[in-house]
Image (cartoon, rainbow, N blue to C red):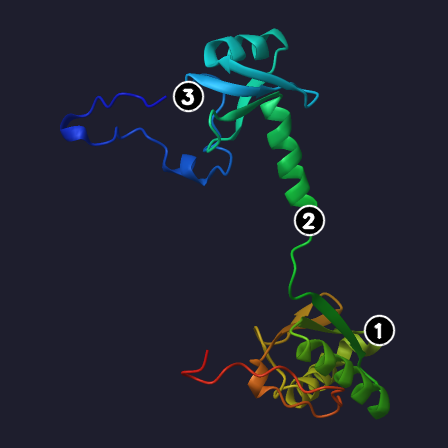
């Protein structure tokens, strides 16, 4: 039910909270907000209860300490279900909170200060493969024991890795020493600019359409 405006000129009151529109459930009509004089009612168990006057349907829902919720506004008359709306909102929010977003994932590659060349190239190849699939890659180098006295050696290893990977990804920020390890995050380059040095592609990556093409 719309609230009457008390401000001059028809402007909205200043205390209106603009964040209300960000609620994805705000548009769902329930109880006294249902405008149709009659509704088709579904019980909490999913049974059809037939067409009722809206006030009667709301009163029925209140008998169960539940809400009358509009689930099909475009139907004639609108379809409403008797349910616990607060529980429904909670379950939906929990479902989306636990769903994993599709798309890029974070991969990690770990180096050591005294890594051998063959192992170094293997790790760089894995990093190239991850970047080629559109994933972000975190390079991490751990210092062991007395190696902390020569952190410059660790930075040199990371510099070599970034140089070998410069045609596949770019660092989000310079490598940083954090405790006993150096970290740097890489984001993949655009698909048409990726040129692996060690990784051999099984199939060529998809190319984006040229300007002017569909």
**Left or right position of 92 against 53:** right
Question: How many C-alpha atoms fall within 10 Å of the one at disc 1: few (<14), some, or many (≥20)?
Answer: few
Examine the image and state in which quarter residue 156 appears.
bottom right
64 over 5 or under it: above or below: above
Q: Earlier in the sequence, mark 3 or mark 1?
A: 3
Q: Earlier in the sequence, mark 1 or mark 2?
A: 2
Residue 214, given in percent of the width and then of the height, sits at: 46, 78
Question: How many C-alpha atoms fall within 10 Å of the one at disc 2: few (<14), some, or many (≥20)?
Answer: few
Can you see residue 132? yes
Tag 1 secondary structure: loop
**Left or right position of 133 against 171:** right
For the residues labelled 3 and 1, the Cα–Cα distance comes to 72 Å
Residue 130, given in percent of the width and then of the height, sits at: 72, 76
**Left or right position of 6 against 174:** left
For the residues labelled 1 and 2, the Cα–Cα distance comes to 38 Å
Residue 21, given in percent of the width and then of the height, sits at: 41, 38
Tag 2 secondary structure: loop
Residue tagged 2:
99
Examine the image and state in which quarter residue 213 appears.
bottom left
Residue tagged 3:
36
Residue 47, given in percent of the width and then of the height, sits at: 68, 20
Q: Which callout, 1 or 2, points to the residue nearer the camera?
A: 2
Mark 3 touches mark 1? (CB < 8 Å): no
For the residues labelled 3 and 2, the Cα–Cα distance comes to 36 Å
209 over 18 or under it: above or below: below
Residue at 43 percent of width and 21 percent of height: 33
How many marks can you see? Answer: 3
């Amino acid at each position: 039910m719309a609230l009457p405006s008390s401000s001059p000129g028809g402007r909205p009151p200043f205390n209106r909270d603009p964040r209300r529109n960000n609620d994805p459930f705000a548009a769902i009509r329930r109880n006294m907000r249902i405008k149709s004089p009659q509704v088709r009612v579904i019980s909490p168990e999913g049974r059809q209860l037939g067409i009722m006057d809206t006030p009667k349907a709301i009163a029925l829902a209140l008998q169960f300490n539940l809400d009358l919720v509009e689930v099909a506004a475009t139907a004639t008359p609108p379809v409403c279900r008797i349910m616990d709306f607060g529980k429904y909102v909670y379950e939906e929010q929990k479902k989306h909170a636990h769903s994993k977003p599709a798309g890029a994932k974070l991969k990690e590659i770990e180096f050591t200060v005294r890594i051998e060349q063959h192992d170094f190239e293997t790790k760089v190849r894995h990093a190239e493969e991850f970047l080629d699939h559109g994933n972000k890659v975190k390079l991490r180098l751990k210092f062991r024991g007395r190696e902390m006295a020569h952190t410059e050696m660790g930075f040199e290893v990371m510099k070599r890795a970034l140089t070998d990977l410069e045609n596949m990804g770019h660092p989000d920020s310079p490598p940083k020493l954090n405790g006993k390890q150096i970290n740097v995050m890489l984001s993949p380059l655009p698909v048409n600019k990726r040129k692996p040095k060690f990784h051999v592609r099984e199939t060529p990556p998809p190319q984006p359409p040229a300007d002017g093409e569909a």
